[in-house]
Structures are given as structure tokens and as C-alpha cells.
Image (cartoon, grey):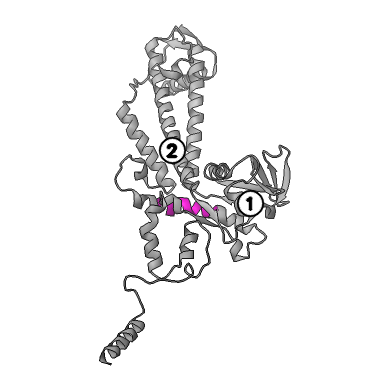
Amino acid sequence: MGIIGKIFNFNKSVPMNYWDDLIRQLQGDYEDLHLRQYAVHTVVDKIINVCLLAQFQSEENSNFLYKLNYRPNPYYNGNEFKRKIITDMLYNGECLVVKIVDDYYVADSFSYDEKTKLFTVTTEYSTKEKTYSIDDVIHIRYNNVEFRNFLNSLSNSYDKLYKRVLDVQMRQQQIRVYAPFKGVTGKSEENTKKFMKFLSGMKQQLENESIAVVPRQDDYDVEEHSQNYLGRSAEELGTIENMYVKQVANILQVPPLLFSGDLADTSEHSKNFVRWCVKPIMNEIANEFNAKQTKSSLKNSLITVNTIECVYVSEFEMARDVEKMIGSGVWTIDDVLVQLGKKRENTKDTTRRYLTKNIGIIEQAEEDYNKAKQKKQN
């Protein structure tokens, strides 16, 4: 009967096949909920793990940047801190970070008073509630209505399953007394309405009373039946699992093919994943921190998000693209170093622009050609 069936001590007055069918139905509902919950965890965990590969960077290597990337407070390292922020953003739709002394903490709980315009916050640093103005907190929001509706439906389904389990528990422990009596009811419309009202009352008795007294009449014979549920095969469960994973992935802007197990070229899907899912989340965090910093008006102190490691596994994979960037003359070597998350060297060679593979200005090429022609003539 599975896990659910083991929690019941069955009413021996009811045939065992009745309980078998009922427990199988509950087991089916539980499997469906479990697969939906699994899909949510699978997709969300992938998003978080890829987001952790991104790094905050700035032209100015300040203590603030070190805090965000490596040690925001004595209790968490940089990855744990970012994981907590992103988890709250995805599951709760928002996250609140407060600065206490020189450390940053994610709020365990908070509320906002519209009248006073103050946040009431509790953190791991202090279990006592403290109030902060809106300018003193980093309030990061994540607005995804579809994902919020999916989580709400999942929560409601768990509530319904719990209620059904309680109903089964009450029914299997219920004492039922059938009191037969004779009466002539006939088949008129009025009598039919009376009988339907009688059935409604009987249903309430069976659902709500631990001891149910139900009348029996000669004209009507009421029996208990349940739909025969045979359970799902492993193949069917796999199909449903993939269906839910795909649904959640689409909601969160993650290419579903990243979860299909197909080892074909996924580079383009990975880039789309970073472009449409990872970057918006990390940029939302960076923008909110920038907005609340006192030096945010200075360009060099603004933090940006570097997602290079989200796309490339190693620097060797970047070599071809780096060569194209430098050879195009648009980026200097220092510009590329910044894109790779490294410091500018600020040397003569790294600040120059290079043109390779015959890329050059047309006027300059004509001038060089004319000079070379005159040199040959002389």
C-alpha cells in the first residue's frame, strides 16, 4: 500500500479491497505532488548553482566588493550569502538585506508599515526586531507571476491532500450504525428531492461524525464504491516528471533541453539561459546594492555582474573569442582583462588597440598604397 497506507489501522468492518483502492488514489495524488515539487527544486537549484558562478566586479576594489563576493558577515561566505538571497527571491518574490555595522545580513523575516514607511526586521545576528527606513535596507524584488501562481497551486494541492488523508483516517476509524426501517416513498419528484436531501445529510454524517447513524430504507439501497486505481508505471512517472520540469523551466526562462539528458551541443541553450534567466536575477541584486551605496554616483564604485564563468568552463575556451575581441580594435587588452574578471595592467601595450587580419581604415590603406607606388617609381 505504500508509505501512506502504513499510517492507518484499518476499520475491519470495511472490506480490505476498499481501503486498497482508496490508498492507491491517495498514493497517486502524492506522486503527482512529489513530481511537481521535484521539478521546482530541480530547476531552481540549477538557477542558483549557475548564479553562484557569477561574480560582482568594480573598477574600484573596495571592502564593499570583497564583502559581496567573499565574506558578507562572520556566519556566511560569499556563495552562501548569494544562495540565500536568490532562494528568497525565487520562492518569496523578494529578499531584504540589512547592513549591521560593516556586515550584510539577509533578513529571516520582515514586514513593512505603509504609514511609518519603516521595515521591521529580524536576522540571525539578532532575534530581536529592529526597524529600518527604506533607505537603510536593500530590498530586492523578483516579479514572476506565473511562478508565484505555480507555487500557490502546489501549496493548495498539499493542503487538499492533507485534508483527504484526514478524511480517510476519520472514515476508517468511524463507527457506522445502519438503522433499517420501512417506509413507502414512491417515485414522485417531491420524493426524489427528499431522497437527495436525505443523501446530503448522510454524506455530512459520514464526513463529520466519528459515530454515524445512517437509516436504510426498503426503497433505496446505498452502497460504498471506490474507483479502482492501479497506479502509474515507471515510464508514465518519467513522462509526467519531464512534463513538470519543462513547465517550470519555461516559467523561469530556462531552456528545457538543459534537463532532457541529451548530450548534444547545448552551448546556445546555455547562453540563452544566462541571457534570459541568470543575468536578470544577478543584475537585479547589483542594481539594488548600487542604488543604496553612498558612492554609487561615482562610476568606478558601481558594481557590475561578470557572467563569464557561467558560459565558459575555462580560459582556454575563451581564447578564440579573446583573440577576435583584441584583433577587432574595439577592445584593448585591459578591456578584455576586465571582462575576464581580472585587474587592468595599465601598461603601454595593454592600453593600445590592435587591428589584425587586414582590418584597417580605407583612407589609410590608400595612402600607404600610394606611398609604396611612389617608392617603387623612384
Q: Quick one: label 1 or label 2, which is nearer the N terminus?
A: 2
Residue 269 tag number: none
Residue drawn at 56 percent across, 55 percent down: 286
Say what amino acid the circle numbered 2 marks. Thr
The N terminus - image quarter: top left
Residue 138 tag number: 1
Please report the bounds of the magenta region as a residue range.
272-284
Q: Is residue 220 visible to the viewer in this orientation of the structure?
A: no
Residue 258 location, x and y as percent?
Answer: 36, 44
Reading the image, the residue beneath label 2 is 42
Q: Is residue 63 left or right of residue 341?
A: right
Secondary structure at badge 2 equals helix
> Could you tell me how many numbered marks the image carries?
2
The C terminus - image quarter: bottom left
Q: Is residue 172 left or right of residue 376?
A: right
- Inter-mark Cα distance, 1 to 2: 28 Å
